[in-house]
Image (cartoon, grey):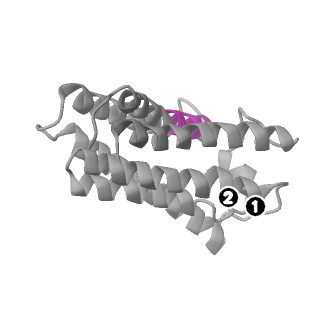
Amino acid sequence: MTEKNIGIFGLLSVLTLITALLVFGLLNSDFSFWEDFISKLGAKGEPNAFWFNIIGFVVVGILLFVFGLLYGKLLNDKLLSILLSLFGLGFAFTAIPIDMEFSRTSVSKAHIVAICLGLAFWLFGLSRLGYNQNLKQRIRKRANLTAIILVLSMIGFVFGLWSMPITHRLVFTIVFGWTAITSIELMNKKTSC
């Protein structure tokens, strides 16, 4: 598997998510790109929820799983491979439709747990990248900087600097921004693993 092919999986996950958000967000007249959680597009009772969950969460999650598995293999790091692929699985399981009216239902809790576990695995993966002295410095710096920005975006919510939907957008931008940058870098290389 070439680095370019690994990068294609990562970039496809980003492009698929953006496309799903735009298409299903525009199809849902009650969805606000600025104020609603992205999960609302796949929530119980929303129009096209089934298709958004399949494309926006399951397909993207599978692409992230493959990307994480192969990226860890490329860097000869089995633990990284496991952590990033578990992030992909966690993302795929966010397809469990949340109930926006009754957030305390078992289904809604499962959706939130999938998000939290997926994000935790991703942060552990970044930590693994950031402190692996065998990797190039730019890979380590990007991982550390990304983790710091992610944590700061969450701290901003805790201190009331912005709302949870804004934090939600920041987290998605940070996670998929790192994935896009890493994927593009891989696609520009010409070696194989």
Query: Mark 2 and 1 residues: CB-CB less than 8 Å, in contact?
Result: yes
Residue at (26%, 45%) from the top-left corner? 74
As drawn, 83 above or below 157:
below
Residue at (60%, 54%) from the top-left corner? 59
Q: Which quarter shows the C terminus?
A: top left
Image side of residue 16 versus residue 10, left or right? right
Q: Taking the image as drawn, is residue 116 in sight?
A: no
Front in this rendered view, residue 15 or 155: 15
How many marks are shown on the rendered structure?
2
Residue at (58%, 36%) from the top-left corner? 169
Front in this rendered view, residue 75 or 90: 75
Q: Taking the image as drawn, is residue 186 in sight?
A: yes
Residue at (82%, 56%) from the top-left corner? 46
Q: What are the residue bounds of the magenta stretch?
A: 166-173
Reading the image, the residue beneath label 2 is 54
Q: Where is residue 165 in the image (x, y as percent from the top left)?
A: 63, 39
Q: In which quarter of the image is residue 45?
A: bottom right
* Tag of residue 16: none
Image side of residue 151 versus residue 28, left or right? left
Circle 2 residues within 10 Å: few <14, some 14–19, many ≥20: some
Circle 1 residues within 10 Å: few <14, some 14–19, many ≥20: some
Which element is circle 1 on? helix
As drawn, 128 above or below 133:
below
Q: In the image, is residue 143 part of the stretch drawn in magenta?
A: no
Image side of residue 184 versus residue 111, left or right? left
Q: Position of residue 163 (x, y in %)?
A: 60, 36
Which element is circle 2 on? helix
* Tag of residue 50: 1
